[in-house]
Image: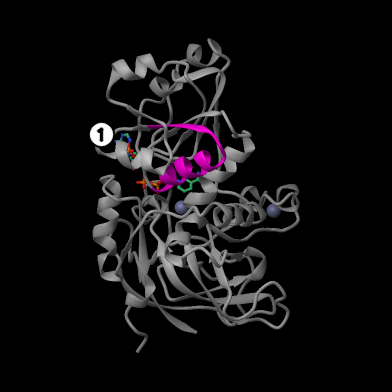
């Protein structure tokens, strides 16, 4: 079927309307009517080709919330009308050790990204097809890569959970954050504001570490007990060795070494932010307190479902600004300027009609 979308025509260019083709339903496919699609900073990194070469035109978007509009003949998990979400990947090999363990995001053959990637299985008519993401009205996804959004959560506020939410939930769980854990969150953006809320809901003592003095009140309202302005070196010195775990959700290149000093003995900083330049760190910073620097990439499908259910139980959603499709380019610039509170979500009803 032909559907309306917004696409980046070529690296670094402004997004504009595009009609794209979605595949016919295979037996295990679900046709999702996308209602809301979040804007993740990764969309911008890729649309501007900041990480690696990409193919264009690119329809970004991997924070998808909508309803099931049709199901293939063998679908058992979903029915028409269900509230569902699609996240950062839509396929994986399903056979390697990581896939079998439920960590398809680390698939040995590579996960298939929701956009800027190529479908594993060719299409009978079209051969190998590029994947196109959520800045569109519909998407067709194998039911094994679709998640259920709890009915008590609004679809617009839930959309960012599909990337921002799971990307911070997964490391918080992996490093066993719970009551009393002293957690630092670097950067109150899309990921960071979910990390503050989720860590607080898990019972942790949360410190927001931000380069924006204006975000203190919001950080505290979202659940942070303390606020550290990263440019205030005196405050950074006083907070030395005060944290057990740091979620680093900063999108820009910063001096990681300064922030590592905030970790106590055996503390861990987990990178989820993906700025461009390699990281520099003094070896003594790690050895002097047996600190670790780690990284984490989104989360598996089952874990994403667990996170959505956790959010349903704790009434956790993203703080959003809903925008029209015509506002996407301005929104991208505002994300880069750290000027979003705290996630832009596109109302896909504003996409042009397919003529
Ligand atoms: P975002 O909304 O733009 O948030 C990034 C935050 O970084 C900003 O709000 C700002 O927080 C801080 N920041 C920005 N520029 C800075 C600077 N010059 N110095 C210090 N801090 C700065 O981005 P996002 O969508 O949350 O994504 C964050 C990063 O995670 C991106 O690189 C994205 O690609 C990556 N990501 C990774 C995964 C994964 O699987 N690992 C998944 C999704 C996204 P303050 O104003 O509070 O300082
Ligand atoms: Zn993302
Ligand atoms: Zn695999």
* Quarter occupied by the C terminus: bottom left
How is this picture coloured? one colour
Residue 307 percent across, percent down from the top left: 59, 52
Give the main secondary structure of the magenta stretch.
helix
Q: Is residue 62 visible?
A: no
Residue 355: tell me if it is visible: yes
To which residue does mark 1 refer? Answer: 213
Q: Quadrant of residue 148?
A: bottom right
Location of residue 29 with respect to 327 vertically, above or below: below
Q: Is residue 302 left or right of residue 39?
A: right
Return the x and y of residue 331 as percentages of the image width and height.
Answer: 27, 58
Q: Nearer the viewer, residue 224 or 330?
A: 224
- Where residue 138 appears, x then y in whole percent? 48, 76
Instruction: In this rendered view, identify the residue nearer to me: 133 or 155.
Output: 155
Vertically, is 310 above or below 62? above
For the record, the magenta segment spans 190-208
Tag 1's secondary structure?
helix
Label 1 crowd (10 A; few <14 / some 14-19 / many >=20): few
Q: Is residue 201 magenta?
A: yes
Identify which residue is drawn at 41% across, 26% down: 256
**Location of residue 161 with respect to 137 vertically, above or below:** above
- The residue depicted at 62 percent of the width and 40 percent of the height is 173
What residue lies at 69% left-to-right and 58% top-to-bottom?
A: 93
Q: Is residue 223 above or below residue 278?
A: below
């Amino acid at each position: 079927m032909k559907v309306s979308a917004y696409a980046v025509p070529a690296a670094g260019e402004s997004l504009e309307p595009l009609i794209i083709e979605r595949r016919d339903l295979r037996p295990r496919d679900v046709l999702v009517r996308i209602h809301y699609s979040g804007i993740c900073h990764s969309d911008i990194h890729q649309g501007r080709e900041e990480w690696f070469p990409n193919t264009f035109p690119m329809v970004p978007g991997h924070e998808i919330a909508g309803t099931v509009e049709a199901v293939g003949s063998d679908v058992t998990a979903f029915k028409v009308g269900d509230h569902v979400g699609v996240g950062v990947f839509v396929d994986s090999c399903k056979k390697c050790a990581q896939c079998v363990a439920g960590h398809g995001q680390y698939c040995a053959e590579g996960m298939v990204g929701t956009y800027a990637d190529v479908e594993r299985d060719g299409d009978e008519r079209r051969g190998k097809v590029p994947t196109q993401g959520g800045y569109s009205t519909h998407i067709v996804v194998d039911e094994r890569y679709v998640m259920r959004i709890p009915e008590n959560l609004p679809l617009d506020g839930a959309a960012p959970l599909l990337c921002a939410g799971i990307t911070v939930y997964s490391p918080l769980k992996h490093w066993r954050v719970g009551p009393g854990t002293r957690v630092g969150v670097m950067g109150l953006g899309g990921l960071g504001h979910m990390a503050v809320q989720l860590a607080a809901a898990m019972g942790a003592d949360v410190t927001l570490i931000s380069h924006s003095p204006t975000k203190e009140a919001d950080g505290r309202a979202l659940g942070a007990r303390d606020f550290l302005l990263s440019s205030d070196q005196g405050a950074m010195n006083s907070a030395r060795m005060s944290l057990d775990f740091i979620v680093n959700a900063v999108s820009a290149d910063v001096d990681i070494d300064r922030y590592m000093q905030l970790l106590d003995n055996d503390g861990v900083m987990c990178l989820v932010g993906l700025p461009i330049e390699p990281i520099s760190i003094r070896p003594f910073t790690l050895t002097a307190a047996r600190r670790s620097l780690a990284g984490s990439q989104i989360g598996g499908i089952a874990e994403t479902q667990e996170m959505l259910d956790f959010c349903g139980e704790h009434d956790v959603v993203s703080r959003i600004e809903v925008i029209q499709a015509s506002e996407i380019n301005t929104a991208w610039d505002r994300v880069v300027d750290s000027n979003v509170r705290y996630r832009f979500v596109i109302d896909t009803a504003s996409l042009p009609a397919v003529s």
